Amino acid sequence: MAAKHLNAPSRASGLVHRNVRLTSRYVVISNDLAQHPTLTVPAIGLAVVIQSLPPGSSVGIKALAARTNGMSELRIAAALRELEAAGFLSRTRERLPDGRFVPRTVSHNRPGADPEAVRETRRPREPRTRPEPPPAPTAPPPVEPPPTPHHAPAVALLAGLRAHEPRLLLSERDVRRLAPGVTVWLERGALPDAVRRTLCADLPRELAHPAGLLAHRLTALLPPPLPASPRAAGPDPLQNCEDCDRAYRAPEPGRCGACEAGAAA
C-alpha cells in the first residue's frame, strides 16, 4: 500500500467559486467598488444595497437603517460620506416649481464614466400579491444647451472640417463639446486656417474616434498666448510755467519756452 503524503499541497486551497447563471433578481457590481483600496467594508456594502434598489427608492439615512438591519444611523452617515468622496454617490437639493427643495441622490456604478454608455437593467417582473403603486417618475436627462454666440466661429470651423477631411465627420454634440477648445485657440491669435490645418494634418489611417483625436490635439498642441504689445508713448504732461503761470507740455515742472528764452537773453 502506497504511503500517503500528508504534507502535499491541496488543490482545493484558496478561494473556489461555484456560481450559477443568474437570470433574475441580481445587480452587476464593478470591481472598482468591490475591491476599492480605500473604502471601508460598510461603505462598500451600503453602495451594493443602494445600487440594487429601483429608481425612486428612498435612500435617506433612516430608510437605509431600516434596510441594513443593525447598521447605526451614525455609521450609515459616515459610509455615505465615504461613497460621496469616492465618486460613487452624489447628493444635491433641487428646487421644485412651487419653491420647495427636495433631496436628490444619484448612484454611480463607475465614477467618471460617460452615463450614456451605461444601459439601465430592467427589474424583472415579479408576481403581484397586492396592487403596487406606480413607480416614481424619473427626471429626464439633462438637455445640452445650444452653443452661445461666443463660440459661433469655433462651431462653424468644426462643422466644416468634413469638407476638408471626410473622416472628420463630427456629431452635433461633439461640435458643441469641442467648440470651447477651438475658441481658446482663436482668442490666442491662431487664424482659422491654421487651426484647421493642425486638426486635419497627419491623421491615422484607422480613425475610429475623430472627436477624441481632435480633443487631444486641441489640448496638447495649444499655442501660448501672444505677448503683450508695448504701450505707445503718450505726450508729455501739462505743466504750469513758474514765471508766467501759462500751461505747457514738458516731462518735468519748470519754465515755458518763452520764459526760458527771455531768461537766457
Image: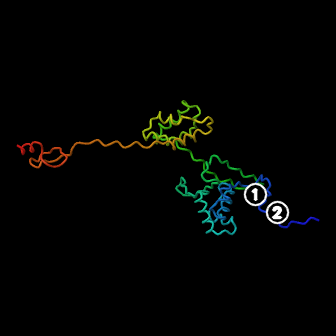
Which residue is located at x 70 percent, y 67 percent?
69
Q: Nearer the viewer, residue 207 or 265?
A: 265
Rendered view: 30 above or below 159: below
The percent coordinates of residue 7 (x first, y second) are 83, 67
For residue 210, say whether it is visible: yes
Helix, strand or loop status at disc 1: loop
* Label 1 Cα crowd, 10 Å radius (few <14 / some 14-19 / many 20+): few
Helix, strand or loop status at disc 2: loop
Question: Which quarter of the image is occupied by the C terminus?
Answer: top left
Q: Of the residues shown, which amino acid type is indicated by label 1?
A: Arg
- Sequence-wise, the earlier of marks 2 and 1 is 2
Q: Of the residues shown, which amino acid type is indicated by label 2?
A: Ser
Q: Nearer the viewer, residue 259 or 126?
A: 259
The residue to which callout 1 is attached is 130
Which residue is located at x 81 percent, y 61 percent?
12
Rendered view: 16 above or below 257: below
Rendered view: 70 above or below 33: below
